[in-house]
Image (spheres, rainbow, N blue to C red):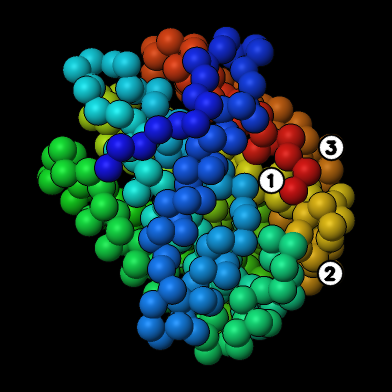
Amino acid sequence: MRLALESDMVAGSMLNFDLDAYAAPRRKLIEQQLDEYLPEREPAALWQAMRYSVLAGGKRIRALLCLASAEALEHMHSSKFKAVEAALPCACAIEMIHAMSLIHDDLPCMDNDDFRRGKPTNHKVYGQAMALLAGDALLVHAGELLLRRTPAHIDSTRLIDIAAEMARASGPHGMVGGQVADCIATGLVPQGKPAATVNAELLESIHKRKTGALLRFSTWSGARLMGGSDEVVEALADFGELLGLAFQIADDLLDTTGDLQTLGKTPGKDQASGKLTWVSIYGIDGSQQTLAALQKKGESLLRQTQLPADATAPLNALLAYAIQRRS
Ligand code: GRG
């Protein structure tokens, strides 16, 4: 499969990097590929429910991170493979896992949300049973796509490692584990023993797993697909995890300061339910200070890769975007 970016650009310097020009053609490719990966087959109601949430127009930050990480390595060593072509199936698989986590997170037994991405949530349209099953199907479909649609020139041992890491990032060590820790902290699951004191350490550990693990996998997988050295792959993975923490803190801030129209989901829910958030511990100013510190640390991780600044400029710009975003 040959993939061409319609208006590809040469990455500019870190200072004047145009993220919109970088992201727009890649988002278009991601959308097209997701659409192709989700055909309207039988049972039609299931595929429609899967398509409804995946193709509902998210920011695609995880997929972009996977592509940007792969592209950062494209010109390096003997890498002869086109980065976007190599990483697109993985980037789409990540978006499917992300979409399933949103569907399940919005269910009445979890956050009980009515709006997501500016539209009624999956269970509001298709009912709870179908929402649950659409999420299940997306999770499994993502694994199949990664394994079957990644170009054959990617070494199979490497691909198996990537599939195992995707499962780890999503499962009990990652996203599900973080969600459970969050549910325990908020008293949502009766089996859990809530911590005596809810502190920043606990909150950071929840964020790192619930949101950070998939973002870590996004940058890790892009670099691993391109055969990056262990040092570079790990530094980019740490960058993804840091971006995940920053992203979640920005999410906590937006719950306090955003509105339904811009956010596409109901604001103020965390506060109303007494949920543990960065803002509830550090306040708005403290959260903004953490974000500024994370931006500096992220830049330092990118320098640590010793990749040229032009090659990591999209990653740097995505971190700035995650921190400054309004939706
Ligand atoms: C079974 C793998 C599995 C997971 C289920 C429900 C659950 C366990 C985990 C919840 C994880 C979750 C919803 C974390 C919140 C992450 C977050 C900040 C979401 C918002 O992401 P954006 O802003 O959304 O990137 P868009 O719509 O732009 O894609």
Q: Which mark is residue 285?
A: 3
Instruction: Establish if 74 lies above or below 144.
Output: above
Q: CA distance from mark 2 to mark 3?
A: 20 Å
- Asked if marks 2 and 3 touch (Cβ < 8 Å), the reply is no
Indicate the amino acid at tag 2: Ala
Instruction: Establish if 280 lies above or below 18.
Output: below
Helix, strand or loop at mark 1 = helix
Instruction: Establish if 31 lies above or below 81.
Output: below
Q: Which mark is residue 272?
A: 2
Q: Which residue is mark 1?
A: 249
Residue 39 appearing in the image:
yes
Taking depth in this image into account, of 75 and 8 the one nearest to the observer is 8
Report the side of 301 relative to 325 (left or right): left
**Rendering quadrant holding ligand 1:** bottom right
Residue 276 appearing in the image:
no
What residue is at 84 percent from the left and 60 percent from the top?
Answer: 260
Where in the figure is residue 58, as x and y percent of width and height?
62, 53
Q: Nearer the viewer, mark 1 or mark 3?
A: 1
Instruction: Establish if 191 lies above or below 150.
Output: below
